Amino acid sequence: MPARTANTTPPASGETDALLRAELGGAIRKLRKERGLTLVQLAERAELSHPFLSQLERGLTRPSMPSLHRIARALGTTQQALMATASVPHSDGPTGTAHLVRAGAGLPVTNTGGTARMLGTPAYSFHPVEYTGVGEVFADFYDHPGDEFVYVIAGEIEIELRTDDAGGLHRLGPGDSIHYPGGTSHRWRAVGDGSQVRLLTVQNATGEADHHG
């Protein structure tokens, strides 16, 4: 594959945001059609409105993490895998194999208490996500096929795990981390000021639907 040169004149932030929304919407539309679903059927499965999904597929809006999770579950993939499609290729070397994400770049997705920013790309078998700000009240439990690693950069959180043979509540501060297998139901909340919390999560792509192309 020929080398790609780094873009030294990136689009303005508004143009980049529109491009990333379009990439995400296109990936959702592609998977929906591959599953043989209409917009109305996907809306029913995801328990979201038909007009919202229509706008999302056309790149006119962006989902929250909870709504993206519902869409991903209905399509047989994960929210992280869908977020990874909204990445602009950027090579940082002569081979064009590196994926560089500058501070503040990427499509931020609203999450309870803050935002989530995808740092990865579908070209790799893991999905790193940066969370800035975390809600101070537990939300619904999440689960997904890929194993997940959580590292606390700043602030404190409580993370609750549900498993068949174990589980419990764990309190993590800066420098702490936790790793749990795919399929583990989990949720977290901030301890103290949620706006001060920053997390890095890394999830592998095992068991996810193929969304390349």
Image (cartoon, helix red, strand yellow):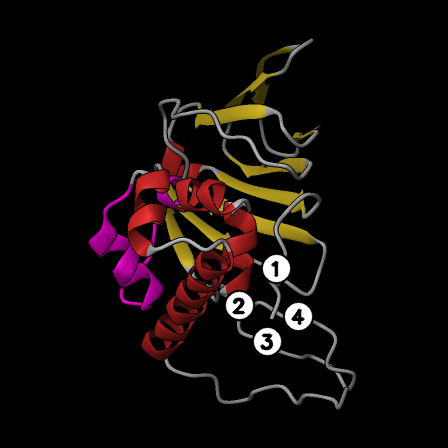
The CA distance from mark 4 to mark 3 is 7 Å
At mark 2, the secondary structure is loop
Assess disc 4: are there few (<14), some (14-19) or many (≥20) residues with their C-alpha within 10 Å of its C-alpha: some
Q: Which mark is residue 87?
A: 2
Q: Is residue 170 left or right of residue 106?
A: right
Residue named by callout 4:
99
Residue 85 picture location, percent across and down = 53, 63
Cβ atoms at labels 4 and 2 below 8 Å apart = yes
The one nearer the camera, 16 or 143, is 143
Residue 116 picture location, percent across and down = 45, 49
Residue 210 picture location, percent across and down = 63, 57
At mark 4, the secondary structure is loop
**Which region is colored magenta?**
48-67
How many badges with numbers are in the image?
Answer: 4
Residue named by callout 3:
89
At mark 1, the secondary structure is loop
Assess disc 1: are there few (<14), some (14-19) or many (≥20) residues with their C-alpha within 10 Å of its C-alpha: many
Assess disc 2: are there few (<14), some (14-19) or many (≥20) residues with their C-alpha within 10 Å of its C-alpha: many
Q: Is residue 173 left or right of residue 182?
A: left
Cβ atoms at labels 3 and 1 below 8 Å apart = no
Residue 135 picture location, percent across and down = 37, 31
Name the N-terminal-most of marks 1 and 2: 2
Cβ atoms at labels 1 and 4 below 8 Å apart = yes
Residue 77 in the image: above or below residue 36: above
* Residue drawn at the location 59% of the way across and 44% of the way down: 200
* Residue drawn at the location 56% of the way across and 87% of the way down: 7
Residue 150, magenta (yes or no): no
Three-letter residue code for mark 2: Ser
Cβ atoms at labels 1 and 2 below 8 Å apart = yes
Residue named by callout 1:
120
At mark 3, the secondary structure is loop
